[in-house]
Image (cartoon, rainbow, N blue to C red):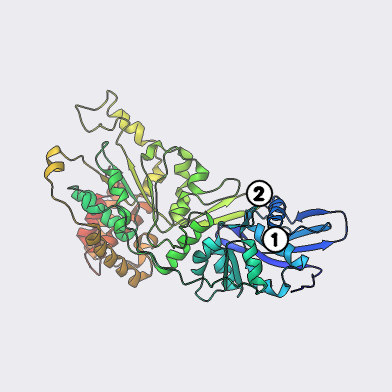
Amino acid sequence: MAVTPPSLARIQSFTFMGIDALPVMVEVQISSGLPSFIIVGMPARAIAESRERVRAALSAMGLALPPKRILVNLTPADLPKEGAHFDLPIALGVLVAMGVIPPEATAPLTALGEVALDGTINPVRGVLCAALAAVSQERGLICPASQGAEARWGHPELNIIAAPTLKALIGHLRKEQPLPPEPPPTPQPPDYGPDLKDVKGMMQARRVLEIAAAGRHSLLMSGPPGSGKSMLASRLPSILPELTPAEMLETSRIHSISGLLPAGRLINRPPYRAPHHNTTLPALVGGGPKAMPGDISLAHNGVLFLDELPEFPRNCLEGLRQPVETGEVTISRAARHTQYPARFQLIAAMNPCRCGYVHDAERACKKAPRCAQEYTARISGPMMDRMDLCVHVHSLSPLEISRAPTGESSAEVRARVQQAYDRQLARQGACNAAMPPEGFAFEDEARTLAEQAALRMKLSHRGITRMFRVARTIADLDAATTVQKQHVAEALSYRNAL
């Protein structure tokens, strides 16, 4: 089928700003002049190298670029663009300009994908974000075949062309050999991770973990080495409430833009991130040359676990203070500001001192108790004030480890947590950790106790607010409509209890 080449070919693609996909029009013009292949419009290096990948891919199919001047313009020209996903729209634009593909075949579509030297279309980051943007523009989407299931989560009616190779895509667009339609995605069973029934004894720690899960509260655990702090933290995701569909989609968009989304699957359980204490500030809060999401954004709607909290660099800990409060992080660069969601549940663990045995007279080092004061001083007062719950985790004796009965399973605890969380959603539309306490109903005795204790303990405004939130969560676990005196008393016992 002969196709008349247009004077100018246009293929739409996207560039990414945070988790948002911004439309970019790829314009290709083939004109008389010295043979050249020029890409303009603020392309990053990966885009500038596209011309060689496109040239090799066309050569692998038996096509050669015409000996003319090929100009590719990425508009808007003042918007920075990066990523190898521009390979596919550039290749399609060149093929349309050469007359290989009819222009009307690509007009209602947007495309992204990396083109290999043999014409294979490789997976790229951000397909889910692009699919959602294509739906909002009422366009179809061309993407790599391995990511068709991911794109399908954007909308069940989205026109998806998941092509394995550039040659197969040309055959589909020319209506010579149509590609099969992308089937509906298959929901995967949730992975709850390690079970809480593995934890023996430790009743107070289990209770605090349940309160933290029910209200999405921050938690700091302190205890000697081997007392089970990390084991408890790793089992917190197994008792967290289920993600709502909106939370699944938002969390999956962040993992998609980071290239960490499992093929064809949404994140259907709260994510769990546990960076090592030698991490850097850009790796934790986000940043780097491409302003990518950090661990706090990858833990959005889930858990960020910081083991050995005082060992983290001071700038990393201080960098968490604002995201903990606002639920988002802004990465500022000279050219642009990128914003990522970061509504995570902060769980931290630490030894009481450097040696870890300050409370054990037989094993404590010679600097005790001064070593404990120096060690905990690495955590600033404002950071410590942001911890809703603090608990000391005691080591189990050999007899308890050997003979203590198995505790409740994660499924049993999760059922109670889900009921308490549902009460919060029905009452205020969000978890207690995200709400001001003015709307909570307190009994007079409970409020009087809270006021007297806050004055005696010299709690800050933030500390009082967080104590009120914890008390409301304890009341929700008891199915109480108002916060009672015993709820406040228990919440106070977890306030700076280290």
Specify the farthest residue to the right.
Answer: 33
Query: Tag on residue 289?
Result: none
Within-10-Å neighbours for mark 1: few <14, some 14–19, many 20+? many
**Residue at point 36% right, 39% down?**
308
Residue marked by disc 1:
91
**Residue at point 75% right, 64% down?**
27
- Tell me the distance, in whole angstroms, between the alpha carbons under discs 1 and 2: 31 Å
Q: Position of residue 296 (x, y in %)?
A: 45, 51
Q: Is residue 97 left or right of residue 121?
A: right
Q: Is residue 229 left or right of residue 56?
A: left
Q: Closer to the camera, 328 or 48?
A: 48
Q: Is residue 72 left or right of residue 228?
A: right
In the rendered image, is residue 43 in sight?
no
Q: Is residue 339 above or below residue 9?
A: above
Q: Position of residue 374 (x, y in %)?
A: 35, 31
> Which corner quadrant holds the C terminus?
top left
**Residue at point 37% right, 45% down?**
384
Question: SS of the residue at dot 1?
Answer: helix
Residue marked by disc 2:
334
Give amino acid for label 1: Ala
Which of label 1 and label 2 is nearer to you? 1
Give amino acid for label 2: Ala
**Residue at point 15% right, 38% down?**
397
Residue 224, quarter of the rendered image: top left
